[in-house]
Amino acid sequence: MTGHVAIHHRTRSFSERWIAYCETHAIPYKVVNCLDSNIIEQLTSCDCLLWHWSHQDPREQLVARHVIMAAEARGIKVFPSSSTCWYYDDKIAQKYLLEAIDAPFVPTYVSYDLHETLRWIDQASYPKVFKLRRGASSSNVKLVRSAGEARALAQRAFSAGFSPIPHYGNDVVTRYRAARRKGDLLNAVKRFPQALATIRDKKKMMGYEKGYVFFQDFIPGNRFDTRVTVIGDRAFAFTRNVRPGDFRASGSGDVVFDGGRINQKCLEIAFAVARKIGSQSMAFDFVTGQDQHPLIVEVSYCYCMLVYSCSGYWDAKLNWHEGHFWPQDAVLIDLLNGVCGSERYRVCPDTVSLVTLAENATVATV
């Protein structure tokens, strides 16, 4: 490396750990603001840029892909690269991408015309799953049991539309579950007024989803889904139980770290898809079809820190590596190795996070 590592900092994001690593290991870095008008100027003398941009920030949704492509045009290594994140938080983009590379994807129908949609609804079989192209944790995901329900959703989709931001009631339940798991209920109650204000502001800025419909086949018989996260040549995996009395696993918070539950075909598919599209980092949600073959529901370039709780990872040859690893480590190290043009850095488990393989390297603990 000859220049700095540029990091866009946001609290409670990957950037906190990236900055700590750079400081611990004397890696030259500078904090930049990718939302500034002069961001390209800020990247002068930088070899790489790391930006954990969020689908929940309207500003980042608006500009992130443009800044990333501009930085790449300048010859800067970026995480996430444009090939890693162009489809992020856009299920329509994911449909076309996964179909283009013949990935095993849950059959999906999209339409941008109400009359065409109504004709399709009348001949479709049910149940179907209705989704918006944006949103996470199963927000705006509905099980549609009849043509009548589907028509009502279609009429709204081509008129008033839907907010991609979860309504207040959904958000309260989600936050309650998260706070209860963490033993943080009191602080969650204190933060509630600010959380409501944030939701209100996001609803104003994000606008409404309208002018299209997105339906997926309902895949029955799944008691859990499988989340596989591929970072470089590593695959981390866990399962999420379906919510009680529901069909959705995403957002349930009922996570099981049991390697015996993991279908090895999910790992093989995840590695193959990530390689085909050139993704640095890709999280997959799988369900199992009636033929017991895994099907991809949706994908994302980023993910929650539950990855660290996995007891190890599989490499691309499906060899197992024991230990707890931080995904931010893997992302940073892969990018640094790409800049260096060699395997100078590697990820280590537990408290040992970054090891320089160069001569006289020392192991640091964090």
Image (cartoon, rainbow, N blue to C red):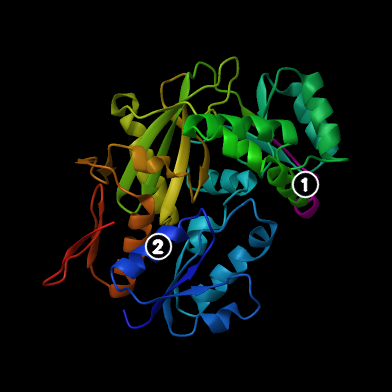
| Residue 294: image location, x then y, percent | 43, 29
Find residue 42 and report its image quarter. Answer: bottom right
Amino acid type at circle 1 is Arg
Q: Is residue 75 left or right of residue 171?
A: left
Query: Tag 2's secondary structure?
Result: helix
- Asked if the residue under mark 2 is in contact with the one under mark 1, i.e. CB atoms within 8 Å, the reply is no
Residue 250: tell me if it is visible: no
Q: Is residue 86 magenta?
A: no
- State the residue at coordinates (43%, 55%): 279
| Residue 209: image location, x then y, percent | 77, 45
- State the residue at coordinates (34%, 56%): 329
Q: Residue furthest left?
A: 360
| Residue 298: image location, x then y, percent | 54, 39
Figure quadrant of the C terminus: bottom left
Query: Badge 2: few (under 14), some or many (20 or more) residues near its Cα, within 10 Å?
Result: many
- State the residue at coordinates (72%, 31%): 169
Q: Which residues are magenta?
A: 204-215
For label 2, the residue is 18
For label 1, the residue is 200
